[in-house]
Image: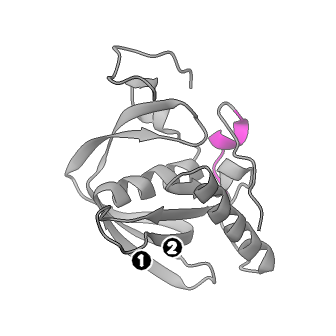
Amino acid sequence: MAIREIVTHPNPILRRKAHRVEKFDQGLQSLIEDMIETMRAAPGVGLAAPQVGVPLRLIVIEYGEDENSDAPPKLYVMANPEILRASSETELGVEGCLSIPGFVGEVERAAEILVRGQNRFGKPTKVKAKGWLARIFQHEIDHLNGILFIDRTDKVWKAAEEKEPAQANVSN
C-alpha cells in the first residue's frame, strides 16, 4: 500500500472520461488499497481513480452517516458505477475536492440516488444513497466523466473564508 499523489486542476486527466474496469486482478486490488490509503491520508471522504492519475472508472468512498455514533464509517469500493435513478428532489450543499485544494462551492445534487456497479472483485452491486452519501457518490462519479464540482456552480470561494463571497476566480 502506498499514498499516491493527488492530481490537481488543471491537469487534463481530470477532464477525460475514464475507461471501464475490465480486469479485477491483483493490480486493481493494489490500486484500490492505495486509493483508500490516499483518501484517508488527504483526508477526504471519496476519491476517484483519475484523481491519482489512473483513467479507470473506479471510486472509493468512506462515510459515516451518524457523526455521533461509535460505529466506524462505511467503506464503499465501486468499479464502473452508474446512477440508475435520481430523485427529482435536490439539495444545495457545499462541496470541496482534493483535486481543487483550498476551494469550495455550493452545488445542487439529487437528494437520493440508486447506483449500480461492481464491487472490488467484479460482482454486481447496488447502493441506495441519500443525503451526503448521495452527494459524495455523485461527486465521485462526475470525476469519472471529466466533470468537476466547479462546473456545476458559479459560487466558488476559498475554503478558509467564513462566508461565501459574491464571486471567486477559479477558472475551469
Q: Is residue 17 magenta?
A: yes
Answer with mark 2 or mark 1, whichever residue precedes in sequence: 2
Binning the other alpha carbons within 10 Å of mark 2 as few (below 14), some (14 to 19) or many (20 upward) gives many
Q: Which residue is mark 1?
A: 126
Quarter assignment of residue 107:
top left
Locate residue 52, reporting x and y percent.
71, 51
Q: Which residue is mark 2?
A: 117
Q: Which span of residues is magenta-colored?
A: 11-18
> Residue at image x 63%, y 54%?
41
> Residue at image x 32%, y 61%?
67
Q: How many marks on residues? A: 2
Quarter assignment of residue 162:
top left
Do the residues under discs 2 and 1 have CB atoms within 8 angstroms? yes
Q: Tell me: residue 95, above or below residue 81.
A: above
Q: Amino acid at mark 2?
A: Gly
Relative to 108, 57 lies left or right: right
- Quadrant location of the N terminus in the rendered image: bottom right
**Label placed on residue 49:** none
